[in-house]
C-alpha cells in the first residue's frame, strides 16, 4: 500500500469513527472552531499556526481535525493535517486529558503523537488560572520508531474565548541532542 493510500485510509477511518460516535449519541454536541498561534523561545524560534475544528463525540471524548503550519529552525517549514481524538476525565479538582494524534505532513512525514496532560484549575485562587503539565511521545510512522519525548510544566490563563499557555519544555531527542525551551501558545475560540 502506498503512502498516499495509507494516509487516505487513516483519514477515512478516523472520520467514520467520528461520524459513528456522533450518530450514536443522537444528541447535538458542541462543535467549535479554534485558532492557535505558538512560538518557542530558544536560539532560533520555531512557530506554529493552527486552525482546528473540534466536536464532542461523547461527554468525555472529543474528535478534531486541524490544519497546521509549522516553521522550524534553519528555514524548515511544513503544512500538516492533524487528526485527533482526546479523552478527558475530572478527578477531584484535576482535569486529565489523553490525546492521540496522527499528523500527515507536506514534507512526507507521518507521525503519531500521544500526550497525557494534567491541569489543576484555580491556581492562586483564580478560576481562570491553572497549573499544567504534560508528557508527549512522538513516533515516526515511516520508520516505526520513537523519535522524541517532550515533558513540560507550565501555567494557563483563560479569559472568555481566549486561552494562553506558557510551558517550560524538556525534549529527549533520539536523533539529535536533547534540549529545553519555553513554549507560548494562544488559542482563540472562533465559534462554539
Image (cartoon, rainbow, N blue to C red):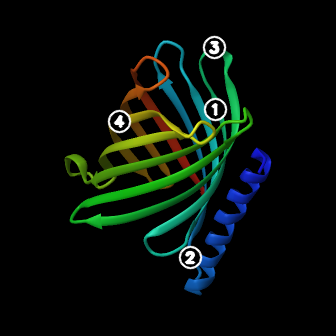
Mark 2 lies on residue: 29
Mark 1 lies on residue: 70
Dot 4 falls on a residue whose secondary structure is strand
Residue 178 visible to the viewer? yes
The C terminus lies in quadrant: bottom right
x, y percent for residue 190: 62, 55
* Residue located 59% across and 36% down the image: 143
* Residue located 49% across and 25% down the image: 40
Q: CA distance from mark 4 to mark 2?
A: 32 Å
Dot 3 falls on a residue whose secondary structure is helix
Q: CA distance from mark 4 to mark 3?
A: 24 Å
Give the mark, 4 or 2, whose residue is nearer the N terminus: 2
Mark 3 lies on residue: 74
Determine which of the numbered discs, if any, sits on residue 151 in the image: 4
- Dot 4 and dot 3 residues touching (CB under 8 Å): no
Q: CA distance from mark 2 to mark 3?
A: 43 Å
Q: CA distance from mark 1 to mark 4?
A: 20 Å
**In the image, is residue 131 above or below residue 77?**
below
* Residue located 58% across and 28% down the image: 47
Give the mark, 1 or 2, whose residue is nearer the N terminus: 2
x, y percent for residue 182: 40, 26
Give the mark, 1 or 4, whose residue is nearer the N terminus: 1
x, y percent for residue 28: 59, 81
Mark 3 neighbour density, 10 Å: few (under 14) some (14–19) many (20 or more): few
Q: Quadrant of residue 164?
A: top left
Dot 2 falls on a residue whose secondary structure is loop
Left or right: 94 in relation to 104: left
Q: CA distance from mark 1 to mark 2?
A: 30 Å
Amino acid at each position: 500500500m502506498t503512502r498516499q493510500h495509507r494516509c487516505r485510509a487513516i483519514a477515512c477511518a478516523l472520520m467514520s469513527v467520528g461520524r459513528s460516535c456522533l450518530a450514536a449519541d443522537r444528541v447535538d454536541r458542541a462543535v467549535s472552531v479554534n485558532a492557535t498561534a505558538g512560538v518557542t523561545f530558544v536560539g532560533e524560534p520555531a512557530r506554529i499556526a493552527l486552525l482546528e475544528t473540534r466536536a464532542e463525540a461523547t461527554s468525555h471524548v472529543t474528535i478534531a481535525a486541524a490544519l497546521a503550519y509549522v516553521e522550524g529552525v534553519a528555514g524548515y517549514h511544513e503544512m500538516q493535517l492533524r487528526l485527533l481524538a482526546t479523552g478527558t476525565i475530572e478527578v477531584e479538582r484535576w482535569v486529565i486529558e489523553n490525546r492521540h494524534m496522527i499528523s500527515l505532513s507536506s514534507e512526507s512525514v507521518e507521525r503519531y503523537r500521544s500526550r497525557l496532560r494534567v491541569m489543576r484549575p484555580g491556581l492562586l485562587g483564580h478560576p481562570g488560572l491553572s497549573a499544567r503539565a504534560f508528557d508527549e511521545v512522538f513516533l515516526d510512522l515511516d520508520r516505526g520508531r520513537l523519535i522524541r519525548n517532550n515533558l513540560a510544566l507550565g501555567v494557563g490563563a483563560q479569559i472568555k474565548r481566549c486561552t494562553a499557555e506558557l510551558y517550560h519544555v524538556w525534549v529527549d531527542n533520539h536523533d539529535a541532542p536533547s534540549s529545553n525551551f519555553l513554549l507560548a501558545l494562544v488559542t482563540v475560540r472562533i465559534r462554539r
